[in-house]
Amino acid sequence: MTSVVVIGAGPRGTGFLERLAANAPELYADLPLEIHLVDPHPPGGGRIWRPDQSPLLWMNSMAEDVTMFTDDTVTLEGPVLPGPTLAEWAGIDGRSFPSRRQQGAYLRWVYEEAVAALPPAVTVHEHRARALRVSGPRDGRQLVRLEGRTEPLIADLVVLTLGHLDAELDDEQMELADFARRRGLLHLPPDFTAESRLDALPAGEPVIVRGFGLAFVDLMVLLTEGRGGRYENGEYLPSGQEPVLHVGSRRGVPYHSKIGYGWEGERPPLPRFFGPAEVDALLSRPGPVDYQRDLWPLIDKELGFAHYHRLFAARPERTSVNWPDFEERYSAAAPGSPELHTLVAASVPAPADRLDLEALDHPLDGLRFGSYDALQDGLRSYIAADLERRHDRAHSEDLAVFLGLLSVHGQLIRLGDIGGRWHGFFSHLASGPPGPRLRQLLALSRAGVVRFLGAGITVEADEERAVFRAGSDGVPGEWIEARALVEARLPEPSHQAAYAAEIVRGGVLAVDSGQLEAAAALGIPRLRRIVLPQAMRSILPSAANEIVSLFKGTSIVSVRAIGELFYQVQVIYGRNGRVVPLLMVATAWYILLTTALSVLQHYVERHFAKGATR
């Protein structure tokens, strides 16, 4: 009997079962098939959409946009089986933002419908456990070991339908956690907010919150309405059980509000400047694709085209040339070129009508405030203006840019992992909270329950005063102290650890199994005398190169205010203004240390290469 193990029973696992049920009559007919569904959380909703969470937590999508079914707009192999959207199934307003509990109930129904639709010869086994390990030969059956189960599941096929993953704490988080333990403070690391120990945050006490995305919105809701506060006539009435949240991030602002209206009229013809042909050209080039050099100019031009196509069509009075002339010259100009900027400036008189992606992405760059009180007023004005614009049809070019973002995202999937910059940019512009949540944030700010820290947040562990300290670029020289620090973001998966494990695994598997059998027959220690000397020859080059690359790549984390070499250099030249000399010092240290690591790598590789060649 064929056995399939599906690891992950949330929306992706449920979608897999729905497609399997749709295709099973043709693919399997009456052949027996066993499906093992592995997830510690209930099938359907999984971890994120499970029913045992606060009803105050919302989805970040409108009910009419959520479905688990196909229709004639979907390109796929296999039958199309239409079904209801969440709004249709629940009988709710399609433009409302349902609770996560409602989404979980919908997903559970879809799961049950998919299981019921499977042929009689297909059996589904649910395992409420975590999958710990998948092992087995590349061309044979796999063993899937589960938490709390002695015998592994035997699988002809393993399907990973995983969503949000846990991750090991990085060095900075471990240092902050250790500091909190030693000094009797509270540190909540990156986590799914509904599972964090928020009850440990005391009422009335200051709390430093690092992160201003959707995880912060959940935190804000659970620590205010979740503790008995309420909103009346647009103002927040505290219960007295709330802490005071001092929130900051790299950008210093929340994600842009969801757009509060639907599309009307002609859509921009996308993709135009970043489509399959451009992706094919990038994939045909030798070497890796660089985001800033290769992708960003194309993304900028594509989003600009969506923006101006809508502006010229919906608000021609805000332009000074006709669309055909503009389109012809826009198409001819190179992405990011001075000619393109000159064309836009001459054709769109008002700067507010021009698309400035850098300003949208980092609206506080270069702004300084005289005090934290002044910063509160400035950020409230910014959030209110963003809310007004994102709900004003007169600026429907913003919705066109959203459509452009979706188009670009669809093209980037073909390029694989391009790093985190696109994800952060896309989330900030396209995945922001619903408008009502930002109105609540403004009310909480006016009530003094939320205080803004600004952009470029820096968090320090003050050993002398036994507190966490937070400052920002927006108010230089000012610091907020607190006995609690919350990282309001989801943990980032440990891709590097998985890649390193695969390097080791590949080296071990490269040792011929016949040698292991011979060593066992002769009584020779297999691991130390046979496996390691040969495996290390395969492991060392990739592993050492990865270590050197990681060391050189640590400069990237300076954007998160993590105190490595490059960040410390930035701190110093920010104080004394000696930028170029200090960058030269940093360069010298990088060259010295990477050279030392490379020399060490050479000698270690030479040691393990003894006997490999004659």
Image (cartoon, rainbow, N blue to C red):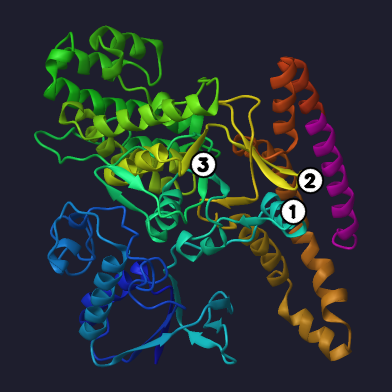
What residue is pinned by disc 1? 179
Residue 491 % position (x, y): 54, 56
Numbered disc 3: secondary structure: strand
Lateral position of residue 317 relative to residue 149, left or right? left
What residue is pinned by disc 2? 463
Q: Is residue 610 above or below residue 253?
A: below
Numbered disc 2: secondary structure: loop
Q: Is residue 205 above or below residue 159?
A: above
For marks 2 and 1, give the CA distance.
8 Å
**Range of residues picked out in magenta:** 589-614
Residue 222 % position (x, y): 42, 58
What residue is pinned by disc 3? 247
For marks 1 and 3, give the CA distance.
21 Å
Q: Earlier in the sequence, mark 1 or mark 3?
A: 1
Lateral position of residue 471 relative to residue 286, left or right? right
In the picture, the quarter occupied by the N terminus is bottom left
Q: Earlier in the sequence, mark 3 or mark 2?
A: 3
Q: Nearer the viewer, residue 296 or 185?
A: 185
For marks 3 and 2, give the CA distance.
22 Å
Res. 96 image quadrant: bottom left
- Tally the marks: 3
Q: Are marks 2 and 1 in contact (CB under 8 Å)?
A: yes
Q: Earlier in the sequence, mark 2 or mark 1?
A: 1
Res. 12 image quadrant: bottom left
| Whether residue 149 is visible | yes
State the mark number for residue 106.
none
Residue 590 in magenta stretch: yes
Numbered disc 1: secondary structure: helix
Q: Nearer the viewer, residue 424 or 206?
A: 206
Q: Amino acid at mark 3?
A: Val
Residue 169 % position (x, y): 65, 58
- The structure residue drawn at horizontal position 48% and vertical position 24%, both measured from the top left corner, is 374
